[in-house]
Amino acid sequence: MSYKLQLVFILASVITFFFIILRIRKHGLNIDDAIGWIIWAIILLFFSIFPQIAFMIAGKLGFYAASNLVFTFFILFLYIMVFMQNIQISKLKQSQKDLIQKLSLKQWGEENQESE
């Protein structure tokens, strides 16, 4: 891993970390959602500071370069985050459907009581 790429990874991890902290403080980002991004920033910083570990893991897994390993981990991380977001969206859709049904039943019941 070249020093330029190492510096880019360090900057990316530090910027990501501070951006997430800022979003938690000022914009009310849910901490449960931010934990994955904070962990990713820490892992990226760790691989950036200690590239020999990334080289060792890359060699054992058959990657040609440590940067390919980091990019593959990042794609895997994003894939997992998208999957987790889809789970949350599905739960929210179900909750929305349940609330609409309850509200409809409540309104229907109120209309029937008024007509009697």
Image: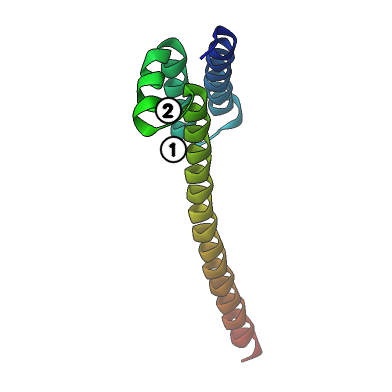
- Describe the element under mark 2 as helix, strand or loop: helix
Compare residues 102 and 15 and report the one nearer the observer.
15
**Where does residue 105 sit, x and y in percent of width and height?**
56, 78
Q: Amino acid at mark 2?
A: Ile
Q: Residue at x 42, y 23 (%)?
A: 43
Q: Residue furthest top?
A: 3
Question: For this view, does 103 lie left or right of residue 33?
Answer: right
Query: Residue 89, relative to residue 47: is it above or below?
Result: below
> Residue 101 lies in what quarter of the image?
bottom right
Residue 32's tag is: 1
Residue 39's tag is: 2
Crowding around mark 1 (Cα neighbors within 10 Å: few <14, some 14 to 19, many 20+) is: few
Query: Residue 79, relative to residue 17: is it above or below?
Result: below
- Quadrant including the C terminus: bottom right
- Describe the element under mark 1 as helix, strand or loop: helix
Q: Residue at x 58, y 27 (%)?
A: 23
Q: Amino acid at mark 1?
A: Asp
Compare residues 74 and 17 and report the one nearer the observer.
74
**Where does residue 1 sit, x and y in percent of width and height?**
51, 15
What is the C-alpha distance between the residues marked 1 and 2? 12 Å
Q: Residue at x 51, y 45 (%)?
A: 79
The colour scheme is rainbow
Mark 1 or 2: in front is 2
Residue 98's tag is: none
